[in-house]
C-alpha cells in the first residue's frame, strides 16, 4: 500500500478508539467451560434457600422458590470433579465439600468463592483418603474418611485432630459417618459408623487414645449412616436399619433388606432411604414408598435424602438427579412417581468415548453405556442440550464413536449393536444386518460391533465393522449399502479399530497390533493387495508402537499417527498407490534441532488439527498442543495445572469457527477457548482486543482476529513506522506488546494492517496501548 494512502487510512482510524472494557468477552482465549453430567447424585444437603447436590459432574444448587440452578466444577474452583460428600455450615453460611482424594473445599454461595484444603490429601500414612461423609460441629467439620475421623478447625483452617484407631478396631478402619449425640449415660459423645461396626466415645476424653472408644459389639457389623432419634441412636447398615436400646442391644427396624444409605429426622418421624425405597417410621407404623423401576420419570437408584427449604422431602438418584417426593400418605402405596425431577442441562454420562463438532458448532458426545442406560448428547451452539436414550430408539450398547455429517446428521458406532444414525430432526435409525450390509461379529447373532464411522467428501458414510470378513462398509448417496473385504495381503483376522478418510478419498484403516492398510478412492473392493504399514518400526522410521490409537490429516495433507508410544507422520499420503512404499513410511516426530524424538513414549488417544495447523493431542497424561511441524510444545494442560478433570483425555475436537477445543476425559467433557480460529474468507476490518491494551493487566497480550488464511500482520505507529511484523495461516494472531527488538512499546495508538500473502488485499484495525 502506498505510504500516503496508508497514512490517510490511519488518520481516519485514529478518530475514535472503541473497545470492550476491562472484562474480556465470553470468547476470550483461555476461558474454560465444563460440559458435565449432573444427574448422578451421591450426596445432598440444604441451606435455608437451596438444595445442594454433590454429583459425579460437580456440585449444583437448586432453589425451589425461584427454580434457579447454580453449578460448580473445577472450572469454578472445585479441587476435583466428582465430590463424595457435602454439608452446609449454618454458622459460616458456607458449604463444605469432600473428595475422593481427601481434599476439602469450602464454597461460599454468596460470592461463589471456593477455597481448597489439602491436609488430608497430603497424609502419607494411608493410601485411601476418601471423604465418606461430612458433619458440622461447633467450629469444626468432622470428616468421616477411608482411614478414620478427621476434625478440621474451620476458624484456624487446619486439621485439629485425626482419630485412626477406634477401640479394638484395626488402625485405619474406614469410617462412613460420624455423629455428635449423647452417650447411653447421657454425657455428650461422638459416634462413628464404620465398616466393622459402631463405635462411641465421650466428647471430653482424649479421643486419640484407642481406649477412649467403645465398640458396640451388639450393633450392626457394617454401619453406613447414623442419626439421633427419639433419645437414642439409629444406624443404617448394609442389611437394614437398627435402633440402639437401653440394654445395649440393637433392634432391627425391618425397613428393608437392602443397605440404608441416609436418614432424616422430622419430629416424631424417622425417614430413611435405601436404593429403591423411602420409608417413614414413627407414630406406631412404618410406611414404605417404592420408587423402583426404569419407567420414565421414576427413580432408579436412590442415594441420599434431605428436607428442602420448602419443607418437602427430596431424594438424590444415581441416574435421574434430584427428585421431590409427593406428600406421602397411606401405608403401602404402589410405585411412587416424584412430583418433580431436577437435572441440570447437560449430558447424562461422564464417561465419553468420543465426541465430534458439526459444521455449525453443534457438539455431539458419545459415551459408554452408563448405569444401565445408553445415551447420546447434543449441544447446540446456543447452549441448549438434547439427550437421546433408549426411549428414543438407541440400542442397548456402548457408544464407541461420533461423526457428524455436513447436514448435521450424527453417526455413531456401537460396541455390539450396529451403526446409529440421528438425523437433524432427532429421528434415530439403527443399521444392522436387517437393513444394511453390516455383519454380526464372530458369527454371533447378538454381536454387531461398529467401532468407528467417517464421512467422505460426497457425504457417504463409512463404517468399520469389527470381527467380520467385511471390515469396511459404505452407504452411498442412494442409501445402498456395500461391504468391502480385506485386501489380499491383510489377514482377515486382524482386529480393525478405526478409520481416516483423507483428502484423496483414500480410506486408512488401523488395526489392533498389526498396522495400517489403505483402500483406494471410490467404493469398489480392492483387487489384490493394498498399501500396508506394518508394525515393527525403529530408529525413527515406521510405527512407533504396534498399538495405533488415532489418525488425523493436517492442513498440509500430512497424516499424523498417534500410538501408545509416541507420534509419527506420513508426509506423502497421496503416494499410497504410487508403487513406492517408502513414500508412506511413517517418520517419528523429532524435536526442532532433530537430535531426539519428540513426545516419545506418550500414550496418545486422539489428535485434532486447529485452523493454524497446530495439533491438539489427547493423551493419557493430559493435553498437548504442538506446532504445525510437530517439533515444539505450545501449550500443555494437566489436571494439576488446569481445570482438566483427569489426565486421561480420551477424545479431542476443534470448532474451527469459534476456536473452541473440546476435551473428553474419562471423567467428563469440557471446552477451552483457544487462539486459533478459521480464517476469514475475504479481507475486512480486523477485530483487535483488548483495547485499550494495558500490559500490566492483560498479561496474554492483544488478539488480532478476522484474518484470512496466510496473512502478514504489521503493527505501525501513528506516523507509519513499522513496530512489529507477524505471520499466521489461521484466522487470528496474538501480539505481546513488544517491538521487533523485544522492547515494550510506549503508550499510544497503533495501527494494525493485515495483508494477504497472495495479494488478497489489506484489512485494518487499531489498538490503544496504555502503560
Image: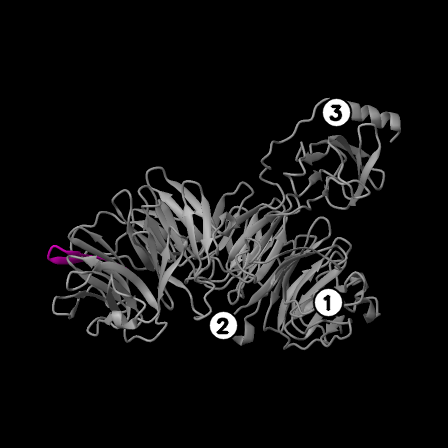
Q: Pick whichever of labels 3 and 2 is earlier in the sequence.
A: 3
Whether tag 3 and tag 2 are in contact, CB under 8 A, the answer is: no
Residue 651 in view of the camera: yes
Verify CB contact (< 8 Å) between mark 2 and mark 1.
no
**Could you tell me how far apart the alpha carbons at marks 3 and 1 are, in whole angstroms?**
57 Å
Asked if 549 appears above or below 54 in the picture, the reply is: below
Q: Which mark is residue 445?
A: 2
Residue 710, image x, y percentages: 79, 44
Who is closer to the viewer here, 698 or 469?
A: 698
Residue 62: mark in rendering: none
Q: In the rendered structure, which disc, 3 or 1, sits on the residue that comes first in sequence?
A: 3
Looking at the rendered structure, the secondary structure element under dot 1 is strand
Judged from the image, the secondary structure of the residue bearing numbered disc 2 is loop
Q: Quadrant of residue 646?
A: bottom right
Between disc 2 and disc 1, the foreground one is 1
Give how far apart the Cα atoms at labels 2 and 1 are. Answer: 29 Å
Quarter that holds the N terminus: top right
Left or right position of 452 against 257: right
Q: Quadrant of the C terminus?
A: top right
CA neighbours of label 2 inside 10 A, class few (<14), some (14 to 19), many (20+) = few
The percent coordinates of residue 704 (x first, y second) are 71, 38
Mark 3 sits on what residue? 14
Residue bounds of the magenta highlight: 276-288
- Magenta span: predominant SS is strand
**Front position in the image: 113 or 225:** 113
Amino acid at each position: 500500500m502506498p505510504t500516503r494512502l496508508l497514512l490517510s487510512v490511519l488518520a481516519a482510524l485514529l478518530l475514535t478508539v472503541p473497545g470492550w472494557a476491562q472484562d474480556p468477552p465470553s470468547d476470550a482465549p483461555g476461558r474454560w467451560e465444563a460440559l458435565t453430567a449432573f444427574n448422578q447424585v451421591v450426596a445432598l444437603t440444604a441451606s435455608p434457600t437451596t438444595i445442594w447436590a454433590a454429583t459425579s459432574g460437580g456440585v449444583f444448587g437448586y432453589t425451589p422458590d425461584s427454580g434457579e440452578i447454580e453449578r460448580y466444577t473445577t472450572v469454578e474452583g472445585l479441587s476435583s470433579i466428582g465430590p463424595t460428600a457435602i454439608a452446609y455450615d449454618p454458622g459460616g453460611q458456607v458449604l463444605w465439600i469432600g473428595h475422593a482424594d481427601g481434599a476439602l473445599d469450602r464454597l461460599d454461595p454468596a460470592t461463589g468463592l471456593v477455597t481448597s484444603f489439602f491436609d488430608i490429601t497430603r497424609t502419607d500414612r494411608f493410601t485411601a483418603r476418601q471423604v465418606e461423609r461430612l458433619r458440622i460441629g461447633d467450629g469444626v467439620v468432622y470428616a468421616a474418611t477411608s482411614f478414620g475421623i478427621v476434625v478440621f478447625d474451620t476458624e484456624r483452617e487446619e486439621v485439629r485432630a485425626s482419630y485412626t484407631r477406634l477401640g479394638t478396631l484395626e488402625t485405619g478402619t474406614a469410617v462412613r459417618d460420624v455423629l455428635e449425640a449423647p452417650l447411653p449415660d447421657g454425657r455428650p459423645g461422638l459416634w462413628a459408623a464404620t465398616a466393622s461396626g459402631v463405635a462411641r466415645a465421650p466428647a471430653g476424653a482424649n479421643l486419640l487414645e484407642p481406649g477412649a472408644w467403645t465398640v458396640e459389639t451388639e450393633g450392626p457389623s457394617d454401619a453406613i449412616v447414623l442419626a439421633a432419634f427419639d433419645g437414642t441412636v439409629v444406624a443404617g447398615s448394609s442389611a437394614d436399619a437398627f435402633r440402639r436400646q437401653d440394654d445395649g442391644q440393637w433392634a432391627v427396624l425391618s425397613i428393608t433388606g437392602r443397605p440404608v444409605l441416609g436418614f432424616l429426622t422430622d419430629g416424631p418421624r424417622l425417614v430413611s432411604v435405601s436404593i429403591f425405597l423411602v420409608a417413614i417410621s414413627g407414630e406406631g407404623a412404618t410406611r414404605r414408598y417404592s420408587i423402583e423401576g426404569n419407567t420414565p420419570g421414576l427413580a432408579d437408584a436412590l442415594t441420599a435424602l434431605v428436607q428442602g427449604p420448602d419443607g418437602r422431602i427430596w431424594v438424590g438418584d444415581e441416574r435421574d438427579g434430584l427428585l421431590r417426593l409427593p406428600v406421602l400418605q397411606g401405608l403401602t402405596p404402589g410405585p411412587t412417581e416424584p412430583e418433580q425431577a431436577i437435572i441440570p442441562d447437560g449430558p447424562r454420562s461422564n464417561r465419553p468415548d468420543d465426541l465430534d463438532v458439526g459444521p455449525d458448532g453443534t457438539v455431539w458426545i458419545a459415551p459408554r453405556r452408563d448405569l444401565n442406560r445408553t445415551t447420546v448428547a447434543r449441544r447446540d451452539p446456543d447452549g441448549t442440550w438434547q439427550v437421546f436414550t433408549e426411549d428414543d430408539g438407541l440400542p442397548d450398547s456402548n457408544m464407541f464413536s461420533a461423526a457428524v455429517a455436513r447436514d448435521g446428521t450424527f453417526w455413531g458406532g456401537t460396541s455390539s449393536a450396529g451403526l446409529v444414525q440421528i438425523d437433524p430432526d432427532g429421528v434415530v435409525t439403527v443399521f444392522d444386518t436387517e437393513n444394511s450390509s453390516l455383519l454380526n461379529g464372530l458369527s454371533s447373532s447378538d454381536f454387531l460391533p461398529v467401532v468407528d464411522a467417517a464421512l467422505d467428501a460426497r457425504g457417504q458414510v463409512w463404517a468399520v465393522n469389527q470381527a467380520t470378513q467385511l471390515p469396511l462398509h459404505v452407504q452411498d448417496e442412494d442409501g445402498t449399502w456395500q461391504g468391502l473385504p480385506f485386501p489380499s495381503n491383510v489377514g482377515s483376522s486382524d482386529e480393525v479399530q478405526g478409520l481416516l478418510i483423507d483428502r484423496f478419498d483414500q480410506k486408512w484403516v488401523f488395526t489392533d497390533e498389526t498396522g495400517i492398510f489403505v483402500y483406494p478412492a471410490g467404493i469398489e473392493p480392492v483387487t489384490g493387495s493394498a498399501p500396508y504399514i506394518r508394525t515393527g518400526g525403529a530408529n525413527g522410521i515406521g510405527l512407533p508402537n504396534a498399538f495405533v490409537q488415532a489418525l488425523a490429516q493436517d492442513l498440509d495433507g500430512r497424516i499424523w499417527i498417534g500410538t501408545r508410544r509416541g507420534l509419527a507422520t506420513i508426509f506423502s499420503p497421496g503416494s499410497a498407490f504410487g508403487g513406492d512404499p517408502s513414500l508412506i513410511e511413517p517418520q517419528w516426530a523429532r524435536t526442532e534441532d532433530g537430535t531426539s524424538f519428540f513426545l516419545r513414549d506418550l500414550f496418545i488417544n486422539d489428535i485434532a488439527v486447529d485452523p493454524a495447523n497446530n495439533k491438539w493431542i489427547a493423551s493419557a497424561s493430559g493435553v498437548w498442543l504442538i506446532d504445525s511441524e510437530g517439533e515444539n510444545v505450545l501449550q500443555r494442560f494437566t489436571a494439576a495445572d488446569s481445570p482438566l478433570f483427569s489426565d486421561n483425555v480420551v477424545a479431542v475436537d476443534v470448532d474451527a469457527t469459534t476456536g473452541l477445543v473440546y476435551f473428553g476425559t474419562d471423567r467428563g467433557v469440557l471446552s477451552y477457548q483457544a487462539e486459533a480460529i478459521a480464517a476469514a474468507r475475504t479481507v475486512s476490518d480486523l477485530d483487535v482486543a483488548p483495547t485499550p491494551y494495558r500490559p500490566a493487566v492483560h498479561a496474554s497480550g492483544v488478539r488480532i482476529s478476522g484474518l484470512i488464511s496466510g496473512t502478514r500482520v504489521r503493527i505501525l505507529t501513528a506516523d507509519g513506522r513499522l513496530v512489529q511484523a507477524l505471520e499466521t495461516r489461521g484466522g487470528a494472531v496474538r501480539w505481546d506488546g513488544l517491538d521487533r527488538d523485544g522492547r515494550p512499546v510506549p503508550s499510544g495508538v497503533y495501527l494494525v494492517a493485515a495483508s494477504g500473502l497472495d495479494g488478497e488485499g489489506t484489512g485494518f484495525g487499531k489498538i490503544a496501548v496504555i502503560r
